[in-house]
Image: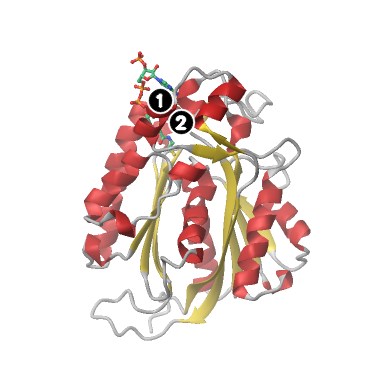
Amino acid sequence: MPSSCPAYRARLIGWGGYLPEPTFTNAQLAEAYQIETDDDWIVQRTGIRQRHLAPAGQVTSDLATAAAQQALAVAGLQANDIQLIIVATTTPDQTFPATAVHVQRKLGNQLAIAFDVQAVCSGFVYALSVADQFIRSGQVRNALVIGAETLSRLLDWQNRTTAILFGDGAGAVVLQAEPLMESTDSGSSNLSQPGIISTHLYANGQYADLLYTDGGASSTQTVGTLQMNGREVFRLAVEKLQEMLQTVLATHNLKGTDIDWLVPHQANIRIIQAMQQKLALPDSQIIVTIDQHANTSAASIPLALNVGLRDGRIKNGDLVLLEAMGGGFTWGAALIRV
Ligand SMILES: CC(C)(COP(=O)(O)OP(=O)(O)OC[C@H]1O[C@@H](n2cnc3c(N)ncnc32)[C@H](O)[C@@H]1OP(=O)(O)O)[C@@H](O)C(=O)NCCC(=O)NCCS
């Protein structure tokens, strides 16, 4: 085997999710925050029916820890079995230290390295890719990868185009190194062995002013509020994500219909449907949670993955495609055999 070939594959062995209470339906949100909107408009344009919002005092690491505990239980591991903790978040507890070290402390882990990844809504796919590199190279046996957000804390409740889109939550997975088996496939990517087959990451800072916060530690010494050019974000998300799906399929010589499950970032049902069309997959092979969770940024994919695995729709051996796009722009995908 050439030395550049990975020696291990990162297998998905645990998953969990946590959604804070209370929930707000579209009508309840409009009433609570005095937003001039209506349920029909929100459902038709976005697919969102409700969202969970963390109560005052509950921070991102609390949500992340609850999701991580579930994922550890599914994996049958103890906190100290983990050597790497990555939290993907845009809403850290503090500017520093990283939310990941708070999660480490709350879990009672003393052995892991721990840091955050900031790629906004693509954060979970980015973090998964980083953990995959640690596992492939044999540096880590068990990794905890978490997407966690209290995105509601960045919202301007006077801005109805953004205030209705987001929610809070956390999802987590445990990855474990397994020796890479010799491929029985005709191609070189070993599509049959369970684990992360490939990750595909992209960024283009040219689009930074389409989705951002108008604050930051070094600029305003505040966190700012979320600002977005919704139409442009929508247009570019569909264009870049469809291009990326084409690349992922071509890399492995697959057709869209070879994918068993699409687990997309949950930003807008119409963006999800555009990806579904690209892959020519029926509704029954897409995990959709946007109606219940709204857009939970870095948490949306692991939360959706957790829903699909827990309710038994996603089964051992299924080929699962994750994809996301977020501020930056950043975007990315991961192809996983469960
Ligand atoms: C935000 C989004 C739903 C807005 O939909 P849109 O069709 O682009 O709507 P527009 O912003 O052009 O607004 C259309 C009209 O609806 C109105 N509107 C905006 N928000 C509204 C709301 N919450 N309720 C009712 N009306 C609203 C606007 O004021 C505008 O009215 P006008 O035509 O009288 O001026 C859509 O652009 C979108 O989903 N973009 C992508 C967002 C995204 O995915 N972000 C995260 C990426 S990770």
Q: Horizontal and vertical percent for residue 113?
A: 68, 62
Q: Quadrant of residue 174?
A: bottom right
Closest to the observer, 335 or 157:
157
Q: Does the beta carbon of the residue at mark 1 sit less than 8 Å from ligand 1?
A: no
Q: How many marks?
A: 2
Q: Horizontal and vertical percent for residue 333?
A: 39, 55
Residue 131 as seen in the image, left or right of residue 65: left
Closest to the observer, 138 or 289:
289
**Callout 2 crowding tier (Cα within 10 Å): few <14, some 14–19, many ≥20:** some
Q: Horizontal and vertical percent for residue 26?
A: 50, 31
Question: Mark 2 = which residue?
Answer: 211
**Callout 1 crowding tier (Cα within 10 Å): few <14, some 14–19, many ≥20:** few
Q: What mark, if any, has residue 229 been given in the picture?
A: 1
Q: Quadrant of ligand 1?
A: top left
Task: Look at 64% across and 29% down and name the residue there.
Answer: 223
Residue 319 as seen in the image, left or right of residue 160: left
Distance Cα–Cα, label 1 vs label 2: 7 Å
Closest to the observer, 324 or 306:
306
Task: Look at 51% across and 44% down and name the residue there.
Answer: 293
Amino acid type shown at disc 2: Leu
Q: What is the secondary structure assignment of the residue under circle 1?
A: loop
Image vertical order of residue 96 relative to residue 224, above or below:
below
Quadrant of image for the N terminus: bottom left
Quadrant of image for the C terminus: bottom left
Residue 121 as seen in the image, left or right of residue 52: left
Task: Look at 71% across and 55% down and name the residue there.
Answer: 103
Q: Does the beta carbon of the residue at mark 2 sit less than 8 Å from ligand 1?
A: yes
Q: What is the secondary structure assignment of the residue under circle 2?
A: strand
Is there a contact, CB below 8 Å, between mark 1 and mark 2?
yes
Whichever of labels 1 and 2 marks the residue nearer the N terminus, that label is 2
